Image (spheres, rainbow, N blue to C red):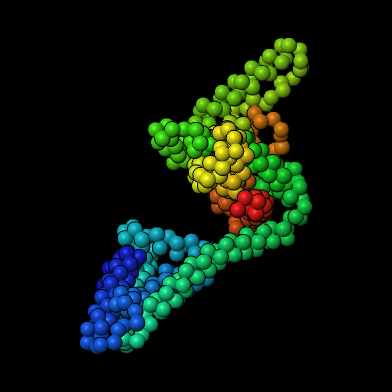
Amino acid sequence: MFQQLGHLPMGWLMFALLAMLASGAFFVGRVQAERFSDATASRLHSRPNYHGYFVAMWTFGPALAVALGYGLLGEPIVRSILVSELPANFQKMPDVELGVYLDAVTRAAIQGGYSGGDRVFSAITSRFLEIEGLVKLCTIGLALLSAAAGFLLARRRIVPSFRARNSVEKGLEILLFLCAAIAIATTVGIIASLLYESLRFFAEIPFWDFLFGTRWNAQTSAEFGALPLFFGTFMIALIAMLIAAPVGLFAAIYLSEYAGPKVRAWVKPILEILAGIPTVVYGFFALLVVAPAIRSLAIWVNTTLMSAGLTAEPLLAAQPTSALAAGLVMGIMVIPFVSSLSDDVINAVPQTLRDAAYAMGATKSETVKHVVLPAALPGIIASLLLAVSRAIGETMIVVMAAGQRARISADPTADLTTITVQIVALLTGETEFDSPKTLSAFALGLVLFAVTLVFNLIALRVVQKYREKYD
């Protein structure tokens, strides 16, 4: 029986249970309030719907808390119970090996059980399902009990003078606060985890050697100079923004100020399609089309300069993969982030500002340059910031089109790598988590976070300046 319960999808089961409990509680609370309204001459303080929402809130809330508790603690509880029942030889296993073994048991249980020839593993998987089924049954029972307790307490408070609307609005206020708190707690948790692991890394590798070192060879845990990674990241992002910023902004200006309704109806959706193309497709395009074209062009430039006697050696690297190829394709990819958001911001500029400029004799181009764009500048900066963040965080295009060699080179036709590519390379495989190689990924993430934060602060300062001027 318990094994069958272990196979049940707990998420959908709890969702259906909570939905039925909340719906039933709302109906009961509303009907009871309507009866009070019909049976007494005094009017209800709140509408019957608010009474129904109040009862549903007190029924749904405790059951939801139980469900969230199971989501956070359900599997650890099942594992701890299972570990306590395992034979002594399992108890003596290292924590890492035992964790890997339990992960395999969990995967087998999720897939419906183990049917192989290992009898011990099969027995442990069956016991895991039994314990999981028992925990699920206890969770459902506890959710029903807590929902029933909340339902009875809420129903007793329904009287004609009860301020149900105030209580419901207070509950919604608490819910919104919790949502904001979760977002803040998530940010704090990310920062704390990055900082903790980075401090462990900097305890072994000096901070200044990491930040300003010019040699990166983390795969052998020998050299951790991250300056080539920073250089490659910002160089590729700069190339991308040199493409995306003017093209996206000019496209937004054309669509919002010059294009007719029919042209806008066709061009804007076509531009936004670029945002829906998977990055691996952009990577293939960069690898198979753009990179060979750039290499051929670089070879032609080298041949021309050398044949003319202007240089004795090739001027450009002309590598099969290059930073220029990745940057160009990445710029095409982030064009919709600039054009779409900038178009929306420009359209939000009040028409009265344009009319006032026209009344003073300004032409359309003068109005766009001196009135519309300054008024829309905060939103345009936000769109550019989003595009920069997207370019800095891109991985697939860089892996396929820019290469993975960490070096500093001003030649855009040379192959480079970025921070995100190295983070992926460092955290994949079977490397020990406590090794400097793995911990360096957290240090790279912390630096990338700090750089993004600086960009945000600069953009916020610019936005505040122009808002004070044009609001």
Q: Nearer the viewer, residue 88 or 238?
A: 238
Q: Tell me: 220 left or right of 67.
A: right
Q: Position of residue 388 (x, y in %)?
A: 60, 44
Q: Tell me: 139 left or right of 364.
A: left
Q: Position of residue 109 (x, y in %)?
A: 36, 62
Q: Nearer the viewer, residue 291 or 348?
A: 348
- The quarter of the picture where the N terminus appears is bottom left
Which image quarter: residue 168? bottom left
Residue name at image x 74 percent, y 50 percent:
211
**Residue 135 visible to an observer of this rendering:** no
Q: Nearer the viewer, residue 128 or 465?
A: 465
Q: Nearer the viewer, residue 278 or 98?
A: 278
Residue name at image x 38 percent, y 77 percent:
165
Q: Position of residue 421 (x, y in %)?
A: 59, 44
Q: Position of residue 425 (x, y in %)?
A: 58, 46
Residue farthest top in this picture: 308
